Image (cartoon, rainbow, N blue to C red):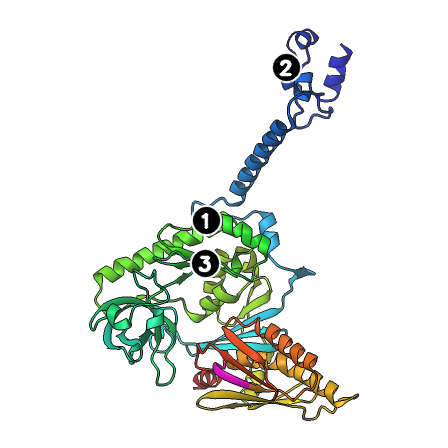
Amino acid sequence: MSEQADARKNGASAHVDNSRENSDEGKNTEKRKPKIGDTRPAPVANEAEKNSSPTATKNTNRKRRKRRKARSAADQGRTSQDNGRIELDEANLRKRRGQERKGKAVGRYTMAVHVEDGLTQIATLEGRSLLEFFVSQPANDVSEIHGNVYLGKVENVLPGMEAAFVDIGTPKNAVLYQSDLVTQHAEDKKKPPRIEDVLKNKQVVICQVTKNPIAHKGARLTQEDSLAGRFVVLVPNSSTFGISKRLHEKERKRLRQILEKAKPAEHGVIVRTAAENITKQEIQLDVDRLVAQWKEIETLASKASAPTLLHREPEMPFRVIREEFNKQYRSVVVDDKELYREASDYLATVAPALADRIELHDQTEEDLPLFEKLYVNEQLTKALDSKVWLPSGGSLIIEHTEALTVIDVNTGKNVGSSNLEETVYKNNLEAAKEVARQLRLRDIGGIIVIDFVDMEIQKNREEVLRVFREALSRDKTRTQVLGISELGLVEMTRKRIGEGLLQSYQKAQS
């Protein structure tokens, strides 16, 4: 009776019957399992349990852990029935929300969006320094068509140029090079088929723009279409399987396991850097949405006649938010109420943890316009000048020619303090970081030659080159850098995508 009294005192939920305990020890052990709220210690295992093999115990525990993880993942990734969004739990939201200090968001970057006379200008700043500047006109189907998918008609095939001109409905025909073709039988990669064997005049092809028209050149096309989502990129009719190399190895391994189940059999998928720490339900939702989008494109292509626009990329503000915005951004500041509401809804869908980092700059209540408040106009004016001053007194001279861009590094007012080699070395380190920033800001593409001040010590040359490459690694536009020559010259290339800062600024001013 004393055992029963102790059990009742300690909150036991099952009455222990001594007579049944002696007759059926196994069943009693089952009844005496600890329950929620029970303050008793766990019952001692009987001899049969003691003699059980460690392997069986480990397998049982492993199964229990798997069941718990499955239930946890299901709870974290429940999909709302009314809007189709993934409802994240507080732990996931906190992990993705980014740093805060005294209730305010903290981040390295700021995005400012200014709307005036139907023109949208987007500036990205690191601290107070201007990094990138974009100008967008709404529904521009002539000069801003990067990412659009078209049903085009081949107008002319040039075997000598290994290229074909394709009519996509723009004033100038676009060009499709042999390297951008997708053939059904591409087993022999060493000997790709000739373009005249793949394309014929008046043939209809589905193609995507990879480069906007620039000056007298038409747009560049590819047959390897891709549809970008927030977390993944879908490559239709491909076996592509990839994960962003910017993610650490442990996260890549986790995403690889998710992608093996989420990837459609007939399409390729690439996981983006923004997919860090996201759940498998979010990846699956993104993949399903892109697959449905591609089916719509194929349906439209089967009914339309070339040339026809099949898919238009979102407008510049939403595209930049999709591509760039993450927890390293302190805020997105918009000075147009309608765009602010649209961007808020978009962020609530693609990045709910960061939805509170979008702000409205009310021009009727603020003393200064947005770009003046953040010193964007002042920095844009300086960025159009050929001379750029370095913090220690040195300078850069940036000159454009028809074939390439030349950047000359000078010590200028920087006279140093110890010796010439040390002065030149420190000046070149400053120049390496500033050149990388100017390439992004001015959107300089093509061949670039940088004339650093001559250094005698090989170790100093290698360090300057390392710092330069590290600064360029933040630039998402593809670059290729060669070593420093004996004359102190660095040859590099940067993919040309846009018109450049000068043309964008002139468009904004006009």
Residue type indicated by callout 3 = Ile
Q: Earlier in the sequence, mark 3 or mark 1?
A: 1
Q: Could you say whether the residue bearing mark 2 is in a helix, strand or loop?
A: helix
How far apart are the alpha carbons under marks 2 and 3? 54 Å
The magenta-colored residue range is 444-449
Could you give the CA–CA distance between mark 3 and mark 1, rounded to whole angstroms?
11 Å
Q: Amino acid at mark 1?
A: Glu
Circle 2: residue type: Gly
Q: Nearer the viewer, residue 335 or 52?
A: 52
Relative vertical location of residue 489 with respect to residue 185 in this rendering, above or below: below
Badge 3 element: strand
Chain-order first, disc 2 or disc 3:
2
Distance in Å between CA atoms under marks 2 and 1: 44 Å
Q: Is residue 269 above or below residue 388?
A: above
Q: Is residue 370 visible?
A: no
- Seen at 67% across and 91% down, the residue is 411
Q: Which residue is mark 2?
A: 26
In the current view of this chain or complex, which residue is farthest to the right? 418
Q: Which residue is mark 3?
A: 270
Residue at image position (66%, 86%) is: 390
Q: Residue at label 1? A: 260
Which quadrant would the N terminus be assigned to in this image? Answer: top right
Q: Are marks 3 and 1 in contact (CB under 8 Å)?
A: no
Magenta segment main secondary structure: strand
The quarter of the picture where residue 300 lies is bottom left
Q: Is residue 2 left or right of residue 396?
A: right
Q: Quadrant of residue 216?
A: bottom left
Q: Relative to the observer, which residue lies in front, 235 or 453? A: 453
> Left or right: 302 with respect to 383?
left
